[in-house]
Image: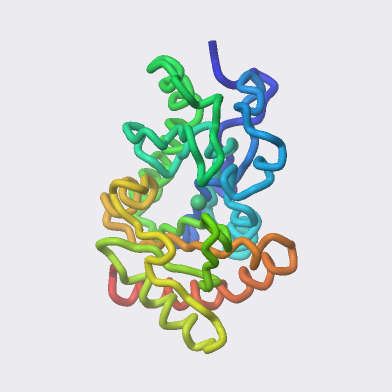
């Protein structure tokens, strides 16, 4: 039986699929929705409001940026507590039994068939959509800068995080370095470089699979959630990032990266 009933929203949403903008946005943790047949996974309502269910504010910022540039944005339709679209399927925490300190009873002791059902309904369509859009751009020889928009909790396991924004990268640091250089001109900003997370083949999916393998310039942008939980902050950060992304487009085009 299909995980999503016919009346439910799709696993993936796409804005401006035919865009020729150099920017290609993704939002892996855009939603806290759960397929109706899974109920609440045994997780209390108060926990569903927290960062463990989704990247608070990230979709709104991604939508503002995609709207400004009329750029493609691909976003997930369901919560990462159902399946994490920024994890390899073989990883146990792709369907987490514990998130931060919150148990997810509905994810415990799943059969292989149940794991496959979630992957086929949610993970695969999301990544197939990204891959086919990138294939189409490559066929048109469009330059592409892959930008994964995420957000992180200001307090994790009791620890406060001072960074307001962070650039995550791995082998190819070029876009990360341009954005850090520009952000650090605002001396009051606290900018993280691969902190509070690192980007790795083990812990990520979107950037390693779609951007690195294709040789696309890219970065994973993490915004601290208290900066972007309200529309005013979302707008402020989008407005701050727009001119910096224009610099990225210029510099990546010049150097042919
Ligand atoms: Zn995220």
Q: Position of residue 172 (x, y in %)?
A: 28, 64
Q: Quadrant of the N terminus?
A: top right
Q: Position of residue 129 (x, y in %)?
A: 46, 38
Residue furthest front in the image: 158
Question: Camera-side residue: 179 or 242?
Answer: 179
**Which residue ends up furthest to the top in the rendered image?**
1
Tell me where residue 53 sits by quadrant: top right
What residue lies at 54% left-to-right and 67% top-to-bottom? 160
In the image, taking residue 4 as reference, residue 173 lies left or right, namely left
Please state if 65 lies on the left or on the right of 131 as rendered: right
| Res. 152 in view | no
Residue drawn 29% across the image and 54% down it:
212
Question: Looking at the picture, does residue 126 appear above or below residue 120?
Answer: below
- Which of the 4 quarters of the picture holds residue 194? bottom left
Drawn side of residue 171 relative to residue 85, left or right:
left
Q: Position of residue 188 (x, y in %)?
A: 56, 86
Which residue is at 36% across, 44% downward?
135
Q: Is residue 174 visible?
A: yes
Residue in the foreground of this view, choosing between 114 and 169: 114
Vertical position of residue 136 compared to residue 243: above or below = above
Q: How is the image coloured?
A: rainbow
The reply, left or right, for residue 26 in relation to residue 70 is left
* Residue 229 position within the rendered picture, expressed as x and y whole percent measured from the top left: 69, 60
Q: Quadrant of the C terminus?
A: bottom left
Q: Number of labelled discs?
A: 0
Q: Residue at x 42, y 36 (%)?
A: 94
């Amino acid at each position: 039986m299909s995980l999503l009933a016919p009346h439910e929203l799709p696993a993936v949403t796409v804005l401006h699929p035919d865009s020729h903008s150099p920017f290609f946005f993704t939002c892996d943790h855009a939603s806290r929705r759960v397929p109706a047949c899974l109920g609440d996974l045994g997780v209390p309502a108060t926990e569903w409001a927290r960062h463990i269910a989704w990247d608070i504010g990230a979709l709104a910022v991604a939508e503002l940026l995609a709207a400004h540039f009329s750029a493609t944005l691909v976003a997930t339709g369901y919560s990462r507590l159902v399946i994490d679209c920024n994890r390899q399927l073989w990883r146990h925490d792709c369907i987490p039994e514990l998130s931060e300190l919150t148990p997810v009873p509905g994810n415990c002791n799943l059969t292989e068939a149940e794991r496959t059902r979630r992957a086929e309904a949610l993970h695969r369509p999301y990544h197939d959509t990204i891959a086919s859009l990138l294939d189409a751009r490559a066929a048109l020889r469009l330059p592409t800068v892959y930008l994964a928009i995420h957000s992180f909790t200001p307090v994790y396991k009791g620890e406060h995080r001072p960074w307001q924004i962070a650039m995550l990268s791995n082998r190819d640091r070029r876009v990360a370095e341009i954005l850090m250089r520009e952000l650090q001109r605002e001396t009051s900003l606290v900018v993280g470089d691969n902190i509070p997370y690192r980007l790795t083949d083990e812990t990520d999916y979107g950037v390693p699979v779609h951007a690195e393998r294709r040789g696309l310039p890219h970065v994973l942008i993490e915004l601290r959630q208290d900066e972007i939980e309200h529309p005013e902050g979302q707008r402020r950060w989008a407005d701050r990032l727009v001119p910096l992304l224009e610099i990225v487009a210029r510099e990546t085009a010049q150097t042919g990266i």
